[in-house]
Amino acid sequence: MNGKEAAGKEAIREVRDGMTVGLGTGSTVYYFLQALAGKVASGLKITGVATSTKTIELAESWKIPMKSLNDVDHIDVTVDGADECDAALDGIKGGGGALLYEKLVAEASDRRVWIVDSRKYVDQLGHFPLPVEVVPFGWKKVYTRLKQDGHRPELRRNDAGKTYVTDAGHYILDLHLDRIPDAGALADKLDHITGVVEHGLFVGMTDTILIGYPDGHVDTLNRD
Protein backbone atom coordinates (compact mmCIF):
# COMPACT_ATOMS: atom_id res chain seq x y z
CA MET A 1 0.00 0.00 0.00
CA ASN A 2 1.33 3.47 -0.90
CA GLY A 3 0.54 6.81 0.72
CA LYS A 4 -2.16 7.70 -1.80
CA GLU A 5 -3.98 4.41 -1.28
CA ALA A 6 -3.71 4.68 2.50
CA ALA A 7 -5.24 8.17 2.56
CA GLY A 8 -7.91 7.28 0.01
CA LYS A 9 -9.10 4.24 1.93
CA GLU A 10 -9.02 6.08 5.26
CA ALA A 11 -11.40 8.70 3.89
CA ILE A 12 -14.20 6.16 3.51
CA ARG A 13 -14.77 6.64 7.25
CA GLU A 14 -16.16 10.08 6.42
CA VAL A 15 -19.09 8.62 4.48
CA ARG A 16 -22.34 7.43 6.02
CA ASP A 17 -25.56 6.05 4.63
CA GLY A 18 -27.84 8.62 3.03
CA MET A 19 -25.13 11.22 2.40
CA THR A 20 -24.57 13.35 -0.67
CA VAL A 21 -20.83 13.14 -1.28
CA GLY A 22 -18.63 15.44 -3.34
CA LEU A 23 -16.19 13.38 -5.37
CA GLY A 24 -12.88 15.03 -6.16
CA THR A 25 -10.44 14.52 -9.00
CA GLY A 26 -7.00 12.96 -9.16
CA SER A 27 -4.86 9.91 -8.54
CA THR A 28 -5.40 9.83 -4.76
CA VAL A 29 -9.17 10.23 -5.12
CA TYR A 30 -9.10 7.15 -7.36
CA TYR A 31 -8.47 4.99 -4.30
CA PHE A 32 -11.28 6.67 -2.39
CA LEU A 33 -13.68 6.07 -5.27
CA GLN A 34 -12.56 2.46 -5.45
CA ALA A 35 -13.30 1.98 -1.75
CA LEU A 36 -16.60 3.87 -2.06
CA ALA A 37 -17.67 1.68 -4.96
CA GLY A 38 -17.08 -1.38 -2.81
CA LYS A 39 -19.31 0.03 -0.07
CA VAL A 40 -22.03 0.93 -2.58
CA ALA A 41 -21.93 -2.59 -3.99
CA SER A 42 -22.44 -3.86 -0.43
CA GLY A 43 -25.55 -1.70 0.07
CA LEU A 44 -24.36 1.77 1.09
CA LYS A 45 -26.84 4.38 -0.16
CA ILE A 46 -25.17 7.64 -1.23
CA THR A 47 -25.36 10.18 -4.03
CA GLY A 48 -22.17 11.45 -5.62
CA VAL A 49 -21.50 14.90 -7.08
CA ALA A 50 -18.41 14.93 -9.30
CA THR A 51 -15.86 17.70 -9.85
CA SER A 52 -14.80 16.65 -13.35
CA THR A 53 -15.79 14.65 -16.40
CA LYS A 54 -13.10 12.11 -15.54
CA THR A 55 -14.59 11.53 -12.10
CA ILE A 56 -18.10 11.18 -13.54
CA GLU A 57 -16.90 8.53 -15.98
CA LEU A 58 -15.03 6.61 -13.30
CA ALA A 59 -17.86 6.79 -10.75
CA GLU A 60 -20.46 5.68 -13.26
CA SER A 61 -18.27 2.78 -14.38
CA TRP A 62 -18.24 1.65 -10.76
CA LYS A 63 -22.03 2.05 -10.37
CA ILE A 64 -21.87 4.97 -7.92
CA PRO A 65 -25.19 6.91 -8.16
CA MET A 66 -24.52 10.44 -9.42
CA LYS A 67 -26.24 13.82 -9.66
CA SER A 68 -25.08 17.20 -10.90
CA LEU A 69 -24.36 20.06 -8.52
CA ASN A 70 -27.47 21.86 -9.80
CA ASP A 71 -29.65 18.92 -8.78
CA VAL A 72 -28.72 18.71 -5.07
CA ASP A 73 -29.63 21.05 -2.22
CA HIS A 74 -26.34 20.60 -0.42
CA ILE A 75 -23.37 18.27 -0.07
CA ASP A 76 -22.67 16.58 3.26
CA VAL A 77 -18.97 15.95 2.71
CA THR A 78 -16.52 16.36 -0.16
CA VAL A 79 -13.40 14.22 -0.42
CA ASP A 80 -10.77 15.63 -2.76
CA GLY A 81 -7.03 15.70 -3.29
CA ALA A 82 -4.53 18.56 -3.29
CA ASP A 83 -1.31 19.27 -5.15
CA GLU A 84 0.19 20.94 -2.09
CA CYS A 85 -1.05 21.60 1.43
CA ASP A 86 0.44 23.09 4.58
CA ALA A 87 -0.01 23.13 8.34
CA ALA A 88 -2.57 25.95 8.06
CA LEU A 89 -4.75 23.56 6.00
CA ASP A 90 -4.41 25.81 2.94
CA GLY A 91 -3.45 24.37 -0.39
CA ILE A 92 -2.94 24.47 -4.13
CA LYS A 93 -5.31 22.49 -6.34
CA GLY A 94 -5.92 22.29 -10.06
CA GLY A 95 -3.02 20.24 -11.37
CA GLY A 96 -5.64 18.08 -13.07
CA GLY A 97 -7.45 21.13 -14.43
CA ALA A 98 -10.62 20.81 -12.33
CA LEU A 99 -10.07 23.74 -9.95
CA LEU A 100 -13.23 25.68 -10.85
CA TYR A 101 -15.58 22.75 -10.36
CA GLU A 102 -13.62 21.60 -7.30
CA LYS A 103 -14.09 24.98 -5.67
CA LEU A 104 -17.80 25.14 -6.53
CA VAL A 105 -18.37 21.71 -4.99
CA ALA A 106 -16.24 22.56 -1.95
CA GLU A 107 -18.20 25.75 -1.27
CA ALA A 108 -21.47 23.79 -1.42
CA SER A 109 -20.22 21.27 1.17
CA ASP A 110 -20.87 21.09 4.90
CA ARG A 111 -17.53 19.36 5.43
CA ARG A 112 -14.41 19.18 3.29
CA VAL A 113 -11.68 16.55 3.52
CA TRP A 114 -8.45 16.41 1.53
CA ILE A 115 -6.55 13.20 0.97
CA VAL A 116 -2.86 13.44 0.04
CA ASP A 117 0.30 11.40 0.18
CA SER A 118 3.05 12.72 2.42
CA ARG A 119 4.98 14.32 -0.47
CA LYS A 120 2.18 16.86 -0.93
CA TYR A 121 2.50 18.16 2.64
CA VAL A 122 4.92 21.12 2.58
CA ASP A 123 6.31 23.81 4.86
CA GLN A 124 5.35 26.59 2.43
CA LEU A 125 3.11 26.61 -0.62
CA GLY A 126 4.38 27.57 -4.04
CA HIS A 127 6.76 24.94 -5.38
CA PHE A 128 3.87 23.37 -7.31
CA PRO A 129 2.79 25.70 -10.15
CA LEU A 130 -0.35 27.63 -9.21
CA PRO A 131 -3.14 27.16 -11.79
CA VAL A 132 -5.15 30.23 -12.80
CA GLU A 133 -8.20 29.54 -14.97
CA VAL A 134 -8.87 32.32 -17.49
CA VAL A 135 -11.37 33.07 -20.25
CA PRO A 136 -10.00 32.43 -23.75
CA PHE A 137 -11.09 35.91 -24.87
CA GLY A 138 -8.23 38.24 -24.02
CA TRP A 139 -6.22 35.62 -22.14
CA LYS A 140 -2.98 37.21 -23.35
CA LYS A 141 -3.88 40.40 -21.47
CA VAL A 142 -4.12 38.41 -18.24
CA TYR A 143 -0.88 36.63 -19.12
CA THR A 144 0.88 39.96 -19.64
CA ARG A 145 -0.43 41.35 -16.34
CA LEU A 146 0.75 38.30 -14.41
CA LYS A 147 4.12 38.34 -16.15
CA GLN A 148 4.64 42.02 -15.34
CA ASP A 149 3.89 41.22 -11.71
CA GLY A 150 6.69 38.63 -11.70
CA HIS A 151 4.47 35.56 -11.46
CA ARG A 152 6.06 33.70 -14.41
CA PRO A 153 2.86 32.47 -16.10
CA GLU A 154 2.87 29.65 -18.63
CA LEU A 155 -0.07 28.66 -20.83
CA ARG A 156 -0.93 25.05 -20.08
CA ARG A 157 -0.89 22.64 -23.02
CA ASN A 158 -2.20 19.12 -23.39
CA ASP A 159 -0.22 16.01 -24.32
CA ALA A 160 -0.65 16.82 -28.00
CA GLY A 161 0.94 20.24 -27.50
CA LYS A 162 -2.31 22.14 -28.03
CA THR A 163 -3.80 24.64 -25.59
CA TYR A 164 -5.34 22.79 -22.65
CA VAL A 165 -9.07 23.46 -22.28
CA THR A 166 -10.92 22.85 -19.01
CA ASP A 167 -14.29 21.11 -18.72
CA ALA A 168 -15.81 24.62 -18.55
CA GLY A 169 -14.10 25.70 -21.78
CA HIS A 170 -11.40 27.91 -20.27
CA TYR A 171 -7.59 28.07 -20.47
CA ILE A 172 -5.15 27.67 -17.60
CA LEU A 173 -2.10 29.79 -16.85
CA ASP A 174 0.29 28.02 -14.47
CA LEU A 175 2.24 30.44 -12.27
CA HIS A 176 5.77 29.35 -11.39
CA LEU A 177 6.20 31.11 -8.08
CA ASP A 178 8.56 28.82 -6.10
CA ARG A 179 7.11 30.16 -2.84
CA ILE A 180 3.93 31.92 -1.71
CA PRO A 181 4.62 33.90 1.49
CA ASP A 182 1.00 35.06 1.88
CA ALA A 183 -1.56 32.78 0.21
CA GLY A 184 -4.50 34.90 1.33
CA ALA A 185 -3.11 38.09 -0.17
CA LEU A 186 -2.30 36.42 -3.49
CA ALA A 187 -5.75 34.81 -3.62
CA ASP A 188 -7.37 38.21 -3.07
CA LYS A 189 -5.26 39.78 -5.79
CA LEU A 190 -6.14 37.07 -8.33
CA ASP A 191 -9.82 37.34 -7.41
CA HIS A 192 -9.80 40.94 -8.64
CA ILE A 193 -8.12 40.49 -12.02
CA THR A 194 -10.62 40.76 -14.87
CA GLY A 195 -10.49 37.65 -17.05
CA VAL A 196 -9.54 35.33 -14.20
CA VAL A 197 -12.33 32.81 -13.70
CA GLU A 198 -10.81 31.04 -10.71
CA HIS A 199 -7.45 30.14 -9.20
CA GLY A 200 -6.06 27.09 -7.45
CA LEU A 201 -5.43 28.66 -4.04
CA PHE A 202 -7.83 27.09 -1.55
CA VAL A 203 -7.47 29.21 1.58
CA GLY A 204 -9.47 28.29 4.67
CA MET A 205 -11.53 25.85 2.61
CA THR A 206 -10.88 22.45 4.14
CA ASP A 207 -11.67 20.99 7.55
CA THR A 208 -9.48 17.89 7.63
CA ILE A 209 -6.42 16.63 5.76
CA LEU A 210 -5.59 12.93 5.73
CA ILE A 211 -1.88 12.42 4.97
CA GLY A 212 -0.90 8.94 3.83
CA TYR A 213 2.62 7.54 4.18
CA PRO A 214 4.45 4.76 2.29
CA ASP A 215 4.24 2.42 5.29
CA GLY A 216 0.43 2.70 5.21
CA HIS A 217 -0.18 4.89 8.25
CA VAL A 218 -2.26 8.06 7.99
CA ASP A 219 -1.90 11.30 9.93
CA THR A 220 -4.93 13.54 10.45
CA LEU A 221 -4.85 17.33 10.54
CA ASN A 222 -8.00 19.11 11.72
CA ARG A 223 -8.85 22.78 11.58
CA ASP A 224 -9.07 24.24 15.07
Image (spheres, helix red, strand yellow):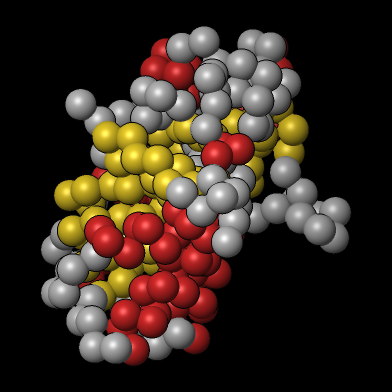
Whether residue 100 appears in this view of the structure is: no
Q: Quadrant of residue 131?
A: top right
Q: 13 or 79: which is nearer to us?
A: 13
Q: How many marks?
A: 0
What residue appears at the point 45 percent right and 59 percent down from the top-left corner? 8
Is 157 located above or below residue 198 in the figure?
below
Q: 172 or 193: which is nearer to us?
A: 172
Q: Quadrant of residue 95?
A: top right
Is 7 located above or below residue 67 in the figure?
above
What residue appears at the point 31 percent right and 55 percent down from the top-left corner? 78
Q: Position of residue 65 (x, y in %)?
A: 31, 82
| 102 relative to 2 in the view: left or right | left
Q: 195 or 101: which is nearer to us?
A: 101
Q: Position of residue 118 (x, y in %)?
A: 55, 39
| 50 relative to 169 in the view: left or right | left
Is 69 located above or below residue 61 in the figure?
above
Which quadrant of the figure contains the N terminus? bottom right
What residue appears at the point 60 percent right and 38 percent down from the top-left corner? 119
Q: Position of residue 4 (x, y in %)?
A: 54, 54
